[in-house]
Amino acid sequence: MKTFQVAAALAVSLICAAIPVHAQAPASRDYPSRPIRMIVPFPAGGPTDLLARVVGQRMGELMRQPIVVDNKPGANTIIGADAVAKAAPDGYTLLMAIDNTLVMNQYLYAKLPYDPVQDFEPIGKVATTPLVVMTHQAGPQSMQALLAQSKAGAAAMSYGFGTFTSQLSGELLKRTLGKEVVSVPYKGSAGTTQSLLTKDVTFTIDGITTAMPHFEKGTLRPLARLSAKPIPTLPNVPSMADVGIKLPDIDVWMALLAPKGTPAAVVDELNRALTQALASKDVQETLLGAGLLADASSPQALRSFIASEAARWRPVIAEAGIRID
């Protein structure tokens, strides 16, 4: 009887010991064991979509599982972000977000269906892309010419934008233009580029990824950059300061995130693959050719960066008086 009790107690202790080990085992032991979905909150063809496909392919090769891009555009990136925020925190659904997804939207809407801080686990920063004021072939020849046209009070002017960062930049620029400029929203860069090619708007403010082939053909013309840093692929494009316009230093940045609660081991594994992908020379060259600058970071650095960007943009948005509700 005593022998049976000892054996039973030993069995129970082994079972109890096994339970926490199983519960706390790193989810990454066999991760990933199936394809990963990377949601892009824009239509196919724009800079964020291209970034996700280039980086996602290399990450998939490193992790030995395909990363499939799923485009969920609309509502200023809210639809795609909300889908990831509500997804299972298992590392199989990721979000390629941009700055307004994680920073600006919270100041534009009275209520978001997701919390940009509480609902995501940062994986790492991915890239930045400079914003450029651009026009069509028959448009102003320079930024100075655009300013002169606006001051002359000739035909009505309009500008297109595909992200809130572009919209905010346009609203700030309108103060300098000195006349009413009609704002025309699009779902992404593919829409803004097409509208410029068809001359539906006077100018657009956007990243250069989709426009680069048209710059090379001469069908579109870059007028000025909003970033203080020169653009390697467009070295002759002046900054706003160069043409006498005072605006904040503005770039669009992209980051990779997972749903809140994703195990730290999985986040670390994703960050390792992301960092290795962005360190690849061929990946960097492909991105640079599209106007994207690889810009890797740790999860912790991304979290701090998001907080600093929120502190920077909150007063700017409040001063501009922009609300979307």
Image (cartoon, grey):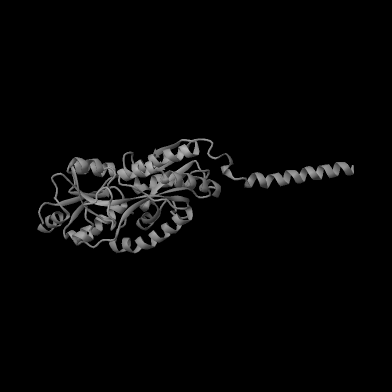
- Number of numbered markers: 0
Residue 305: x %, y % from top left? 42, 58
Question: How far across and down, in percent of the image, does residue 176 sit?
Answer: 19, 61
- In the image, is 34 to the left or to the right of 74? right
Horizontal side, residue 259 vs residue 135: left or right:
right
- Whether residue 187 is visible, yes or no, is no
Residue at image point 13% right, 54% down: 145
Rendered location of residue 132, percent (x, y): 25, 51
Quarter containing the N terminus: top right
Outermost residue, right direction? 1
Q: Is residue 250 left or right of residue 245?
A: right
**Which of 135/202 is in front?**
135
Q: Residue furthest front?
A: 281
Name the residue located 81 percent from the left edge and 45 percent from the top edge.
Answer: 9
The C terminus sits in image quarter:
bottom left
The answer to whether residue 294 of the structure is visible from this angle is: yes
Q: Splitting the image into 4 quarters, where does residue 2 fall?
A: top right
Who is closer to the viewer here, 170 or 129? 129
**Picture quadrant where residue 280 is located:** top left
Q: Nearer the viewer, residue 39 or 265?
A: 265
User: In x, y percent, where is residue 192?
Assistant: 25, 44
